[in-house]
Amino acid sequence: MVEGNRTPGLLKRLRGDRRGVSAVEFALIAPVILLFYFGLAEFCQGFMAQKRMGRTAATVADLVTQNETVTRADIADVFEVGVLMMRPFPARPLEQRVTAVTRRDNGQIRVDWSRAEGMTARGAGSTVDIPAGLIANGESLVMTEIVYDYESPFGELLPGLTRFSHTYYLRPRKVEQVRCTDC
């Protein structure tokens, strides 16, 4: 049993004891540090997915523009390369579209052919908008559009789904216009 006059001495000693202050401060700051660490790691993962998606768009366009003519099977193989480039990220949310366009004499940009995986192909003869100054009348280019839905594993803390999209334009290398023989 503690006597009444000994208790004030014990409280006085505990009040002056500083040995556990560091542990208490760490316990208060550790959750914030961990949140910053996991948030930064998740940001880096999302950034890496976005960069891979951009490189995929460029590579798909590059592979198509190296040919004089392509077929549906050729484009399916190119799309498979795009899927492989996204590794280690899952390929399921990857959407790809390759479209060959030509600027007509009246200035309209018309679709010559289009193939897609995961999204709708553009209709032949339909019009599209491209940035000004890319091609002159009578010239053509290949337009690659890639969309990737990045899902955060930390959906409780961060936005669960982020949609990245990239459009890449490239002129044919060997011919004036890349043709698709069976599109």
Image (spheres, rainbow, N blue to C red):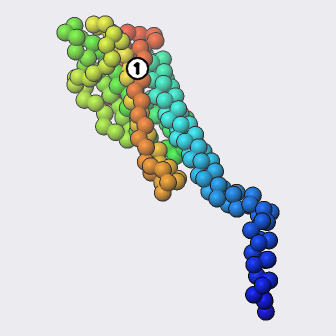
Q: Quadrant of the C terminus?
A: top left
Q: Residue 128: where, in percent of width, then height? A: 26, 23
Going by the image, does 72 lie left or right of 86?
left
Task: Classify 10 Å Cα crowding around label 1: few (below 14), some (14-19), many (20 and above).
Answer: many
Foreground residue among 9 and 158: 9
Q: Residue 148: where, in percent of width, then height? A: 44, 40
From the viewer's perspective, is residue 100 above or below residue 106?
below
- In the rendered image, the residue lying farthest to the left is 106
Residue located at (22% from left, 7% from top)? 105
Displayed quadrant of residue 176: top left
- Secondary structure found at label 1: strand
From the viewer's perspective, is residue 90 above or below residue 146?
below
Foreground residue among 142 and 174: 142
Residue located at (50% from left, 54% from top)? 157
Residue located at (76% from left, 82% from top)? 7
- In the rendered image, the residue lying farthest to the front is 5
Give the number of callouts: 1
Q: Residue 118: where, in percent of width, then height? A: 37, 41
Q: Quadrant of the N terminus?
A: bottom right
From the viewer's perspective, is residue 53 above or below residue 90?
above
Foreground residue among 2 and 82: 2
Q: Is residue 15 visible?
A: yes
Going by the image, does 139 lie left or right of 36?
left
Q: Residue 11: where, in percent of width, then height? A: 75, 75
The amino acid beneath tag 1 is: Tyr
Going by the image, does 117 lie left or right of 123?
right
Q: Is residue 82 visible?
A: no
Residue located at (46% from left, 28% from top)? 57
Displayed quadrant of residue 115: top left
- Mark 1, residue position: 169
Foreground residue among 168 and 151: 151
